[in-house]
Amino acid sequence: MKKNLAFVLGGIILIAILFYSFVYFVPYSEGTRAGELIKFSKKGVLSKTWEGQISQGISGAQIFDFSVMGSEDEVIQKLKDYQGSYVKLTYVERYATFIFWGDTKYFVTDISKENSPHFNRE
């Protein structure tokens, strides 16, 4: 009986590790998006995560929600510094997320400040 229980628990643990590894190491898509950084904050009750939004249209009708992994210190600092600026985000979309990673499936890996196409200063 104990042997069967050990096999079942071992199987459950193995499946959990394989699922976590798949979600972490196999991205669904990768890409870039640009817009005005309108929100960036650390939120949560049990697990604090970094969440943000960029507005991709002049009217603010198209909002892109994203998360940032807590280990991305350089990206977090840049997002704090670029608040209210026009930025280009490089992101990875994952198949799923976990409560301790973030609210969205889009995780920003890099950010750069760009010139706004709406307000050319030439």
Image (cartoon, rainbow, N blue to C red):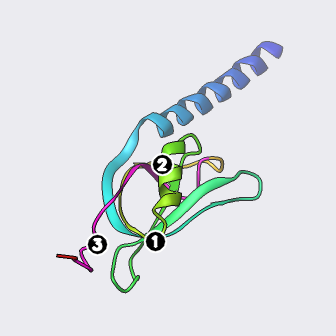
| Residue 96 in sight from this viewpoint | no
Residue 22 place in picture, x, y as percent = 47, 35
Would residue 4 be found to the left or right of residue 105 on screen?
Answer: right
The magenta-colored residue range is: 101-120
Q: Are marks 3 and 2 in contact (CB under 8 Å)?
A: no
Which residue in the protein does label 1 denote? 84
Residue 78 place in picture, x, y as percent = 47, 53
Label 3: state its secondary structure: loop
- Asked if the stretch drawn in magenta spans residue 111, the answer is yes
| Amino acid marked by disc 3 | Ser
Residue at image x 70%, y 18%?
A: 7
Which residue in the protein does label 3 denote? 116
Q: Earlier in the sequence, mark 2 or mark 1?
A: 2
As measured in the structure, the alpha-carbon distance from the residue carrying label 2 to the one carrying label 1 is: 16 Å
Up/down of 43 relative to 19, above or below: below
Figure quadrant of the C terminus? bottom left
The quadrant in which residue 56 appears is bottom left
Q: Residue furthest bottom?
A: 59
Q: Which mark is residue 71?
A: none
- Magenta segment, principal secondary structure? loop
Most foreground residue, 68 or 106 = 68
Q: Residue furthest right?
A: 2
Q: Residue furthest left?
A: 122
Residue 18 place in picture, x, y as percent = 54, 29
Most foreground residue, 14 or 8 = 14
Residue at image x 37%, y 47%?
A: 28
Would residue 48 be found to the left or right of residue 73 on screen?
Answer: right
Q: Which mark is residue 75?
A: 2
Figure quadrant of the N terminus? top right
As measured in the structure, the alpha-carbon distance from the residue carrying label 1 to the one carrying label 3 is: 11 Å
Q: Earlier in the sequence, mark 3 or mark 2?
A: 2
